[in-house]
Amino acid sequence: MSKQILILAGDGIGPEIVKVAETVLAQVNQKFDLGLTWQHGLLGGAAIDAHGSPYPEVTSQQAQAADAILLGAVGGPKWDTIERSIRPERGLLKIRSELNLFANLRPAILYPQLADASSLKPEVVSGLDILIVRELTGGIYFGQPRGIRELENGEKQGYNTDVYAESEIKRIAKVAFEMAQLRGGKVCSVDKANVLEVTELWKQTVTQVQKDNYPEINLSHMYVDNAAMQLVRAPKQFDVIVTGNLFGDILSDEAAMLTGSIGMLPSASLDEQGKGMYEPCHGSAPDIAGQDVANPLATILSVAMMLRYTFREEAAAVAIEQAVGNVLDQGLRTADIMSEGMTKVGTRAMGQAVVNAL
Ligand code: IPM
Ligand code: MG
């Protein structure tokens, strides 16, 4: 098997967190003799500056040739005013869609050491371990028609289309059920079937897949407004949550915050063969870019997910996760997870501590 990784640092804090994650990757590659190799490419604003496109042809070719991709984050105020169709975020959507990375896994796990960093009471979040399975290549993010048009009376109107075909719902439901088999055996499908037809079909289809193929899985359904509430009221009731692109975007930020900081949350976006792109759930945080204060742990934990899901190197993945636990035990904290009595460190020092722990 070839073991080629493409690293796309992106914009904002992307380059600094990815650089640190790369040192962790190098360490684990050597220690476990993984035989991984990697090269770098451009995505987002960095690619716009160099090639005039957020996902240029050269990046597309690199991405297709790679077995896995490690991404930092894209976007920033510098590119917020350019033509919408070539903004950095469109590059991210295009790479997800071109590579068919439809299954987005966003685990929200509370490290016991960070129970105090959460804005919720420790007893509400301690031991939290949720997996959000977000559909990533369909729904309102990609539905046509879309745009901003002018009405006859001269007023502008913005519009988007939320669409899901049965086949798209079936394949993401399957991923959720299979993930649940490896975990607590519970799936909650989140929809807005009381209002939106597209999610009415979602609910019916998920129900059918469970009935036909996963009778042992405990499936429940929840409207998205209630799910948003339940996530802060009693988050531990959830095991796997499966939902569409937009609801998944929103609920995964909310779930991230339960764990203390979105700076702790990794993600995997997989195709049907297990090829994947791995990225932190947080954005490019332009306000703190270049200051060595960003939390690199979500990116480092994304490397662990890459080893687990694409390269099937469970021992190496666990070693990274344990090293992260170890630096938290040492009391090291970046600003976003800082609490009283702990030692505040920067991006690079945090990365170095993880490498040392490995
Ligand atoms: C995410 C991000 C992206 C999304 C943005 C940057 C396009 O918020 O990965 O959650 O909305 O999918
Ligand atoms: Mg998001």
Image (cartoon, rainbow, N blue to C red):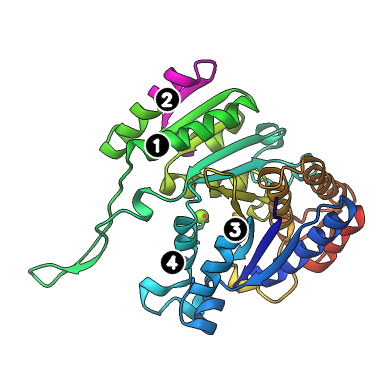
Does label 3 or label 1 sit earlier along the sequence?
1
Of label 2 and label 4, which has the lower sequence position? 4
Tag 4: residue type? Arg
**Which type of secondary structure does the marked residue at label 1 adopt?**
helix
- In the picture of the structure, the residue carrying the numbered disc 1 is 169
* Cα distance in 3D space between marks 3 and 4: 17 Å
Residue under label 4: 90
| Pointer 4 local density, CA inside 10 Å: few below 14, some 14–19, many at least 20 | some
- The local crowd at label 1, few if under 14, some if 14 to 19, many if 20 or more residues have their Cα within 10 Å, is many
Answer yes or no: do the residues labelled 1 and 2 have beta carbons within 8 Å? yes
Give the spatial CA distance, label 1 vs label 4.
23 Å
- How far is mark 2 from mark 4, CA to CA? 32 Å
Q: Is residue 95 above or below residue 11?
A: above
- Amino acid on which the number 3 mark rests in the picture: His
Q: CA distance from mark 3 to mark 1?
A: 26 Å
| Among numbered discs 3 and 4, the one appearing first in the sequence | 4
The answer to whether mark 2 and mark 4 are in CB contact below 8 A is no
Secondary element under disc 2, as helix, strand or loop, is helix
**Residue 56 visible:** no
Side of 157 where 351 appears, left or right: right
Label 4 sits on a secondary structure element that is helix
- Residue situated in front as seen by the camera: 164 or 62: 62
Q: Measuring 48% from the left and 50% from the top, which residue is drawn there?
A: 249
Does the closest atom of ligand 1 sit within 8 Å of the Cβ of label 1?
no
Residue 72 falls in image quadrant: bottom right
Which residue is depicted at the point 29% across and 39% down? 198
Q: Measure the alpha-carbon separation of dots 3 and 2.
A: 32 Å
Report the magenta residues as a range. 207-228
